[in-house]
Image (tube, helix red, strand yellow):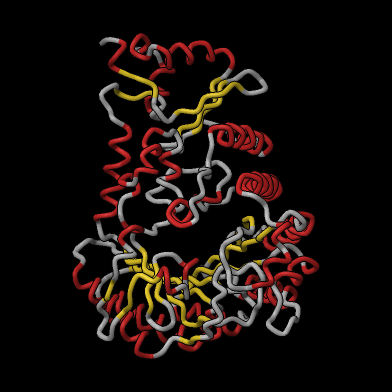
Amino acid sequence: MTDRSYKASKYNFIKETERGELLLYNTKTGGIGLIENDQKDQALAIFQNPGTYIEDELFNQLRGNDFIIEAERDEVKEIITDYDNYLQIDKNIQIILLPAEACNFACPYCFNYRDRKLMMEDWVYDAILQNIEHKLQKVDTPNIKVFLTWFGGEPLLAADKIVTFTKKVRELCSKYSAELRASMVTNGYLLTAELFARLLDAGVTGYQVTLDGTAENHDKYRYLCNGGPTFDIIYNNLKSISENFKDESFYFNLRSNFMGDSLKYVEELMGMFVTDFNDDSRFNLYFRPVYQYETADKDISAIKDNICDFKEGKEIQNRLSFELMNKCGKENDMDLLNPLARPRDSWCGVEKKLVVGADGSIYICDTFVGDVEHRIGQIMPGGNLDLNETGKAWTRPFYEYTQRKKCLECKMLPICMGECRRNWLIDHVAECYYSEESIYSDMDNYLKYLRKGDQKVS
């Protein structure tokens, strides 16, 4: 064989550690490896001329983890083929429903603030159920999953409707041998142990609840419509669920939003989480910056100066994530939020999911709910969709856009997949979420985390 028989992967990140080893990471496979000092020069030589070392054990290890690949492989083409297959194969049905475009909170930064105060009518529920059944009838793929997410507003303002409808979808899934995965994004204020038992019985097993740090900060930004505090009730609800449903299977992703002046309180919440929930693997905590999305809520003007810019927000998010990992001794398994990014099918699945508002309006992104300008259609009685031209820009493959052609040359492509479409289609944000600099920094921090836990890097 010649030197051209093998090559280093386009998606390798290689850096020397403080101890002089080589730390490897591949964005296409998510693989990470550590080369000891005595093999460092040999590894660098293999990456330079792979075909010279095909009988070498280290060569075979690097090849086995796709750090070294066959020269004829076109990795970009492989990624695009997998992405196209993801778009074309109907393995899953993904629907986000807003049973209540109303809320009991008045958070100043809420991007869903449209003040529509709508509750989903019965005909919309019926139409959605018929739409799901139409799709299940057409799909011949085995093991299909129906992902049903309740969103808002505050969905639990329509708790009885949610319980009833989720049971109907579960019956449909049973009829067509499909699997239901129902989840909910809720502020948690109404989520008592009694209501949780009903939701769990109906099949809602996943929950996202937001706590913006401890009570002192949380209650300043996530208050009731009458101005009342909310933290204590939410936190006690969560503790009650953890303590009273020890044998049940479900999960909670606890989101903590932060701004420049709230980091102290977010870190205090981290300490509370470790004390109260670290022994319950069903509860996970993660961190996100408050973004300055367009909102009709004029109260946001008072907090604009505290909102982190794009780069600063991501850096703080990763710092907090590594801090939590070190305290808890476990990783966050959510792809976007794992401090060392993992390859994905799509940035957020926007190409295949459907967001249905309380009046049957259809949106492509949940940040646009209630915004007529970004409405892409309407669900009709009987379950058919009446779609307009607006949605096509959101469902086209990202690589067809001129402004995304650069993605095909980028080493971050497998972990980004064109990034957030709102950023470049609507908000015209030029800065990418990932950078080579940030990846190298995350590799360093990830290695420190593994070493602190005495975990092996293979």
Q: Of residues 207 and 250, which is closer to you in this image?
A: 207
Q: Is residue 178 visible?
A: yes
Q: Is residue 346 above or below residue 389?
A: above
Nearest the viewer among 394 and 425 is 425
Residue displayed at 55% across by 47% down: 338
Q: Residue furthest bottom?
A: 122
| Horizontal arrangement in the rendering, residue 166 relative to residue 158 (left or right) | left
**In the displayed structure, would residue 319 be above or below residue 197?**
above
Is 157 located above or below residue 435 in the figure?
below
Residue 267 located left or right of residue 331: right
Residue 312 at x, y percent in the picture? 66, 46
* Residue drawn at the location 66% of the way across and 20% of the way down: 19
Where residue 297 sits, quadrant-wise, is bottom right
Residue 119: x percent and y percent? 48, 87
Total count of labels:
0
The residue that appears at 33% across and 12% down in the rendered structure is: 51
| Front-most of residues 447 and 26 | 26
The percent position of residue 213, horizontal first and vertical second, equals 73, 62
Residue at x 65%, y 38% (from the top left corner): 449
Residue 95 shows in this picture? no
Q: Nearer the viewer, residue 36 or 166?
A: 166
User: Is 149 on the left or on the right of 385, as rendered?
Assistant: right
- 330 vs 411: above or below: below
